[in-house]
Amino acid sequence: MVQSRWQLAQQQLAQCRSKHSVARISVSLDKWHGVVPGNCSLLRTQWRGNKTMTMRNTHSDVASAKAPAEVSTNLLKGSIRIVTIVLMVTAAAAPLVVVSTYIPISYGYGSGFATSLTYLAAMLILLLFAVGFAQMAKRITAAGAFYNFTTQGLGRPAGLGAGWTVMLAYSMIAPAISGGFGYFTSAMFRDYLGLDIPWWVCSIGGLALMFLMSYFKVTFAGKVLGIALGLEVLVVFFVATAIIVQGGAEGQMVEALNPAAFLAAPAVGLGFFFAFWSWIGFETTAIYGEETSDPKKSVPKATYIAVITLGLFYAFAAYAGIVGFGSETPEQATNLLGEYFFVLADMYTWPVVGVLMDFLVITGFFACAFAFHNNASRYFFSMGRDRILSPKLGRTHKEHKSPYVANAVQAGIAIVTVSIFALLGADPLLHLGTWLPIFCTAGVVFVQMTVSISVIAYFNRIGRTGWLDRWKSFIAPLLGAVAQFIVLVLLTIYIPFIAEHDILALNLIPLYVILIFGFGVGYALYLKRRRPETYQRIGTIYEDEEDAAVQPETVAAKTR
């Protein structure tokens, strides 16, 4: 009798897994007495995959046993509109931070007079990538984005490798940007209030505030980022327009739009590094897909809107900065660096605008770090929900539906990272704010290249119809992958120039990226052999309506 009930329980498990694609199922033989044919609700709880079940012949206990407390693992569906997604992406890009910090560096040390063209070229490269990215987003909705997309295209091992790489890259961006936030906040306290507060105290305080904000609904974060972003864009647009309308130092600089300017650039690779660094995080559109009311339409639209608007905005601001100082742009940028656009604001607008920029650059750094805090948290959440990392990371708040455990872990990692740099006496801008972004940029661009290849593989399997479909799912992703490979080569060549130090540990950053990706692949193969139930969860799609997506089981079978 016991044997027959055991077999019945096993059969019901198999039926439930195939029918509902439930990834987290556990069966305790405290409950097996009540298994009814066709009743999956008794089985759809938490599966630990260890087949260790305790048999008890206590039927009376079963009748009186209370159901275990339900743990929330779902994000708040339908809570985000396309406007909020675009705000998250552009906040991660931090327009004022890019314009005030990275564009002047590109003037002096990177693309020179071709800086505006560099941003336009980067926009075109990312648009090629976005074409295939959008095609995947129309079919697959998942908080893991790159992680899930790569799993669907290239299989579980490559998917976990991409997931590990982008998760660690995003996890390091938050402390890297927090270094700039701490630096400028400390300067504000000193200049305006006469208080001498160390930069690392401001950075850690900001990271703690990010965790508190991310504890609540993501819509709250969207409102905060929206206000800060709106002010940033308005101020930069106003200053840039004022410079161009007034004719700058020597009139309009049409030579800045001549491709020949690339030939005279100090270091084109450095210019492209800062250009791509300015866009990192635009995959936020897919990360928030599970929390969007209509992800199949909203995510692709938001992706195109974010890439194009940011590209045109950066190119416009970069051109205005060249017009502002004319032929002296590279020299002035080398001397002024972070003060470049603040000086232009004083020259072509009113003093109050410069004061406003002093405060907005702080909110810009905060908004940028906060956006990446949310990005990294959702990757930790995805890994936890798939049981690759601790299942606790896959929990969401019962009321707010925020991934609060993953948020806490990400905040802890960022605080520890900032503390280590502070204890070593590192500079928040030159070291924390420059060395970490090299790794982050290399990691994200490498994963974007991998995703482009995944798009091709995915559609090779499910098929294409018509020339337009071939463009979207083969030609554009192929061109995007090649272009991003070239960017990676340039980044590798110019690492010593970017870091201003020829340090072996920094020069090996591309190797770190490959090793992290390889570790993810190797760990997936280990799971396949030793923990097959966990292996099956890699890249699981949790959206209910994924009719067009190829399930990971199918991918694994076809990519072994």
Image: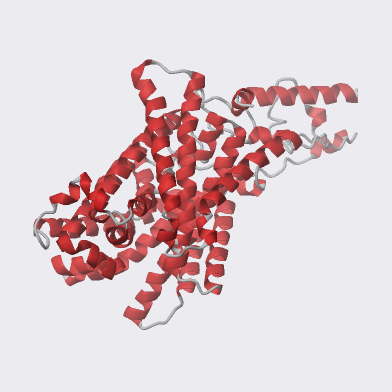
Viewer-proximal residue, 500 or 121? 500
Looking at the image, the residue that sits furthest to the top is: 465
| Image-based side of 536 in relation to 477, left or right | right
| Image-based side of 314 in relation to 511, left or right | left
Q: What residue is at 42 percent from the left and 50 percent from the top?
A: 491
Residue 185 x, y percent position in the rendering? 39, 71
Viewer-proximal residue, 121 or 94? 121
Quarter of the image that includes the N terminus? top right
Quarter of the image that includes the C terminus? top right
Viewer-proximal residue, 223 or 135? 135
Q: What residue is at 72 percent from the left and 36 percent from the top?
A: 47
Residue 547 x, y percent position in the rendering? 51, 23
Colour mapping used in the image: secondary structure
Residue 261 x, y percent position in the rendering? 22, 50
Looking at the image, the residue that sits furthest to the front is: 263
Q: What residue is at 34 percent from the left and 21 percent from the top?
A: 468
Count of number-bearing discs: 0
Quarter location, residue 18: top right
Q: What residue is at 36 percent from the left and 63 percent from the top?
A: 363
Residue 35 x, y percent position in the rendering? 77, 26
| Image-based side of 126 in relation to 379, left or right | left
Does residue 298 show up? no
Does residue 404 show up? yes
